[in-house]
Image: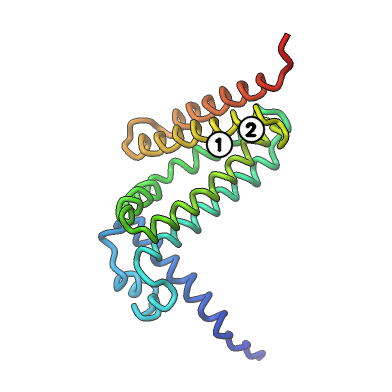
Amino acid sequence: MKRRRPLTREESQALTREIVLEAAEELFLEQGFHATSVAQIGANAGRTPGSIYGNFPSKEALCFAVLERHYKQVIGELADSMGAAGEDVDSKLDTFGRWWKTFSSNQRFTMLSAEYIAAVRRDAQRFDELTAFWTVAKMMLRSILAAVGEVSADDKGANALLDSALVGITSSALGLMVSEAGTMVDSETSATVLTDTMRLWMNRIQESGKPRK
């Protein structure tokens, strides 16, 4: 019987980190950020609190890592889906609508995100990390919108409109996520409203590139 190679220190640490993230995500989504302790996460992961702190300096840092991993994954899935969609705007918007319906219906992540933001709002370091990640996420979304609207890098007017579109669309998206979490709208309505908002902006951007008579 072939013996398995012992894990290196780096491999062991990476494995522990993944196990802790999975255990933390389960508890944070089930109980919320404030109601979950590091001791509970350790028990769920089969790890000591000391081993958790060896990978994450605080509960806030651990929660941020859970959220960061989730949002990187879903935004990556969106980028892949949009890349595989048809070339026309309607096909891409339909693809976005289907993605949004699945994404926004995960209300436990919406609630955890809101609780975490409120918890670290006065913690400069943690909030700066959150802001930096959100900036990266917005740039990824901007590149997706640019592809949908066929905006070239040298079209200053269209790019200015694209920046406004990004603000309008992301603000609408956040409001719809909160509305879904509060059961004020369902996922179907949310997807329709956001897709229509994107279509209006894309039409406006495309119209801006047409020569005036």
Q: Which residue is mark 2?
A: 159
On the image, the x and y values in percent for residue 141 come to: 58, 42
The mark nearer the N terminus, 1 or 2, is 1
Residue type, label 1: Arg
- Secondary structure of the residue carrying numbered label 1: helix
Residue type, label 2: Asn
Most extreme residue toward the left is 35
Query: Do the residues under discs 1 and 2 have CB atoms within 8 angstroms?
Result: no
Q: Is residue 22 above or below residue 156?
A: below
Most extreme residue toward the top is 213
Q: Nearer the viewer, residue 155 or 175?
A: 155
Residue at the (39%, 45%) spot, across then down: 107
Label 1, label 2: how far apart the Cα atoms are: 26 Å
- Secondary structure of the residue carrying numbered label 2: helix
Q: Which residue is mark 1?
A: 98
In this image, 21 relative to 94: left or right?
left
Tell me the crowding category of disc 1: few under 14, some 14 to 19, or many 20 or more residues within 10 angstroms, Cα based.
some
Quadrant housing residue 147: top right
Q: Is residue 150 above or below residue 22?
A: above
Residue at the (50%, 34%) spot, across then down: 167
Quadrant housing residue 119: bottom left
Marks 1 and 2: which is nearer the front?
2
Quadrant occupied by the C terminus:
top right
